[in-house]
Amino acid sequence: MSDIAQTGSSSLATPDPSSGDPAQAPVLSLRGATLTLGGRTLWSDLDLEVAPGEFIAVLGANGTGKTSLLRTVLGEHDLDSGSMRFLGAELRRGNHRIGYVPQQRLSDQDLPVRARDLVTMGIDGHRWGTGLPSARRRARVDELLDSVGARHLAGMRIGLLSGGEQQRVRMAQALAGDPKLVLADEPFLSLDLRRQGEISALIEDKRRQLGFAVLLVTHDVNPILDVVDRVLYLAEGSAKLGTPDEVLRSDVLTDLYHSPVEVIRQAGRVLVVGIPESPQDAQAHHEEAHR
């Protein structure tokens, strides 16, 4: 995989594992990682190190393995080759130091799950159900909801919350295990521009306050363009890694796609034009979304 960020302007330096300083060791490390699903290789020979507190956006067209990358980190998919380590150890499924904000799904309005219940699941995720009531657990849930500006939503059913409100509650749930890494899968999906800005600011504020790293999948980098350190762009089974200015360029993406791609920058926003999508890509996106 090509890493073009060695001399970039990212606000966080690439970690140096040989330094011996635990604070500089990568939170997440993938080496020569290859993932194949349904007989199709989504990405191969992927090298990625996520530094403590670093913010990386995962970009690419439909079906390129963005969501599958997060699910691999969560332990839901096994690598075909290569290695993956979290906090210096072999990554195991269900690690509570990894927070997860899933894609927003429509919820049944009659589903008897309140915002409070969802956050409690983040605290008691290793147990079946939400556990017995306790003053300590309730106080922790209140603290988490308070931290994301959602305390007033505690007693409301999830299906009755707006998209932005649901994302705040999901963020509170992701913070329950005091994470070192937060994975966010399309957190701006179906949100208007105002709500996108609010959720982007929330993620960034909590990252700076608590010091966790972020690996965020999105089809639109603009809501986080001013705060992201690096982008990982997946396409055609390959990847480019670097700062937004290094990767989001016409020549770089044209080389990655082996087809003319134009990157337009206007009024502080980025638009990528001409990304090819084959029938195989569309089918892979359908399969990935339903795994």
Image (tube, grey):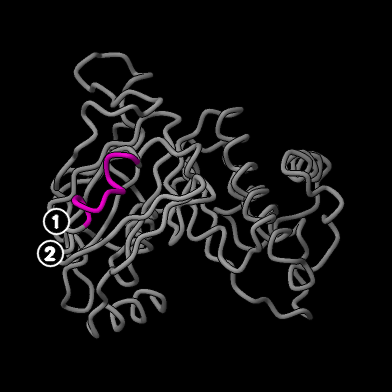
Left or right, 194 with reference to 8: right
Q: Residues within 10 Å of mark 2 (few under 14, many from 20)?
A: few
Left or right, 156 with reference to 21: right
User: Which of the two residues, 290 or 269, is positioned nearer the viewer here?
Assistant: 269
Image quarter for residue 127?
bottom right
Left or right, 151 with reference to 5: right
Q: Quadrant of the C terminus?
A: bottom left
Amino acid type, label 1: Asp
Image quarter for residue 286?
bottom left
- Residue at 73% x, 38% y: name it: 147
Q: Is residue 226 above or below residue 267?
A: above
User: Is the C-beta separation of discs 1 and 2 under 8 Å?
Assistant: yes
Amino acid type, label 2: His
* Residue linked to disc 1: 255
Q: Is residue 94 visible?
A: no
Q: Is residue 50 visible?
A: yes
Residue 72 placement (x, y as % from top left)? 32, 57
* Residue linked to disc 2: 258
Q: Is residue 78 above or below residue 221?
A: below
Q: Which mark is residue 130?
A: none
Q: Which residues are magenta?
A: 245-253
- Residue at 40% x, 48% y: name it: 57
Q: How far apart are labels 1 and 2 at the CA level?
A: 5 Å
> Is residue 224 part of the magenta span, yes or no?
no
> Is residue 252 part of the magenta span, yes or no?
yes
Kindly state the secondary structure of the residue where label 1 is placed: helix
Residue 209 placement (x, y as % from top left)? 61, 27
